[in-house]
């Protein structure tokens, strides 16, 4: 039986350095995010609601930021972040700012560039870190 993960795809070029992300020791599974118990995290203003799964060293979260949310810290953790809904502003410590809308993402390595999240309208994010 053919598997999409093992056949070559013409639309996705191989990484130029020959390295690929390696995920190990996670059996196939599905997540019903509505069944994951939320945890609440206060910002300088507003509230972040996290629904979190941990798979070995990989944390996966569905995060809802309330309108007016501003993070209470500069984050140094690496993430791959996808905006599902709403609008997210991200400020970098060097003064640059970026706005994500639904369908956009950002990625940053651990310790690469300190960043802080904010939203006027609220946002729903899917985050892997």
Image: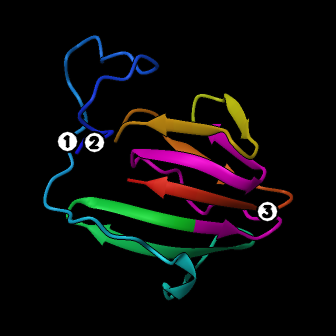
Locate residue 112 relative to residue 82 in the image: left or right.
left
Q: Which residue is mark 1?
A: 22
Q: Residue at x 46, y 44 (%)?
A: 80
Q: Magenta residues?
A: 63-91
Q: Residue at x 60, y 39 (%)?
A: 105
Q: Secondary structure at mark 1?
A: loop
Locate residue 111 relative to residue 36 in the image: left or right.
left
Residue 87 included in the magenta stretch of the image: yes
Q: Residue at x 66, y 69 (%)?
A: 64
Q: Which residue is mark 3?
A: 122
Q: Which residue is mark 2?
A: 3
The answer to the question of whether label 3 and label 1 lie on touching residues, with beta carbons closer than 8 A, is no
Residue at the limit of the structure toward the front, as seen here: 1
Q: Residue 67, which numbered label?
A: none
Give the answer, above or below, for where 22 lies relative to 49: above
Q: Secondary structure at mark 3?
A: loop
Locate residue 109 relative to residue 119 in the image: left or right.
left
Depth check, mark 3 against mark 1: the one in front is: 1
Residue at the limit of the structure toward the left, as seen here: 25
Depth check, mark 3 against mark 2: the one in front is: 2
x and y percent of residue 91 in the render?
66, 40
Mark 3 or mark 1: name the one nearer the start of the chain.
1
Residue at the limit of the structure toward the right, as seen here: 121
């Amino acid at each position: 039986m053919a598997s999409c993960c093992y056949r070559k795809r013409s639309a996705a070029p191989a990484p130029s350095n020959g390295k690929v992300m390696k995920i190990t020791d996670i059996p196939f599974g599905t997540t019903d995010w509505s069944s994951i118990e939320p945890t609440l995290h206060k910002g300088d203003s507003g509230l972040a609601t996290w629904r979190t799964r941990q798979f070995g060293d990989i944390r996966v979260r569905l995060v809802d930021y309330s309108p007016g949310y501003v993070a209470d810290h500069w984050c140094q953790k690496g993430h791959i972040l996808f905006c599902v809904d709403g609008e997210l502003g991200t400020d970098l410590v060097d003064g640059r700012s970026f706005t994500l809308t639904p369908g956009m993402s950002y990625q940053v390595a651990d310790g690469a560039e300190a960043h802080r999240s904010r939203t006027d309208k609220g946002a729903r994010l899917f985050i892997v870190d």
